[in-house]
Image: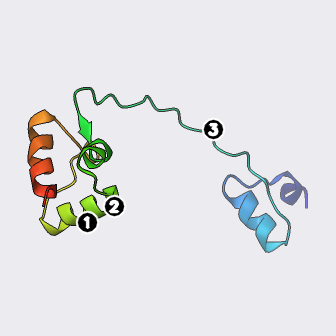
Amino acid sequence: MECEEDFTLSNPYPSMAAQIAGRQHHMPPAPPVKRAPKSHTGMQSLAEICSEIGVKPSKARRLLRAQHVEKPSAGWKWDELQACKIKKLLSF
C-alpha cells in the first residue's frame, strides 16, 4: 500500500485523470507570444489602391483571385511597379 501512496502522475496525465474523475485540473495558460511588427516600407496595400480608384477591397480581392493573381507573401501589398499593374487590372 505504501508504493501506491508515493506514486505521482507526470504531465499530461493529471488533467486526464481529473477529467475522468469529474474534476477540473487547471493548468496555467501559456504566456502570449510577442512578435515584432513587420516592416513593409515602400509597399502599397490593396486598401490604399482601392481608395485611389474607388473600389471596395473585398471586390478587388475577388477580381484579383478571378484573374489568378496570387496573394503576395507580404499580404495584399506590392511595390510601386507591381501596384501600378494591379491598378490597371482593377480599373475597368
Provide residue 19's location: percent of width, then percent of height.
77, 69
Q: CA distance from mark 2 to mark 3?
A: 34 Å
Circles 2 and 1: CB distance less than 8 Å?
yes
Q: Amino acid at mark 1?
A: Arg
Question: Could you tell me which residue is drawn at 24 percent across and 37 percent down?
Answer: 44
Q: Residues within 10 Å of mark 1 (few under 14, many from 20)?
A: few
Provide residue 12's location: percent of width, then percent of height.
66, 56
**Dot label at residue 31:** 3
- Please name which of the two marks, 2 or 3, marks the residue nearer to the observer: 2
Question: Could you tell me which residue is drawn at 91 percent across and 62 percent down?
Answer: 1
Going from the N terminus, do you reach mark 2 or mark 3 first?
3
Q: Secondary structure at mark 1?
A: helix
Circles 2 and 3: CB distance less than 8 Å?
no
Image position of 54 (left or right of 12):
left
Question: Could you tell me which residue is drawn at 85 percent across and 72 percent down?
Answer: 22
Q: Which residue is mark 2?
A: 58
Q: Secondary structure at mark 2?
A: helix
Q: CA distance from mark 3 to mark 1?
A: 37 Å
Provide residue 87's location: percent of width, then percent of height.
14, 48
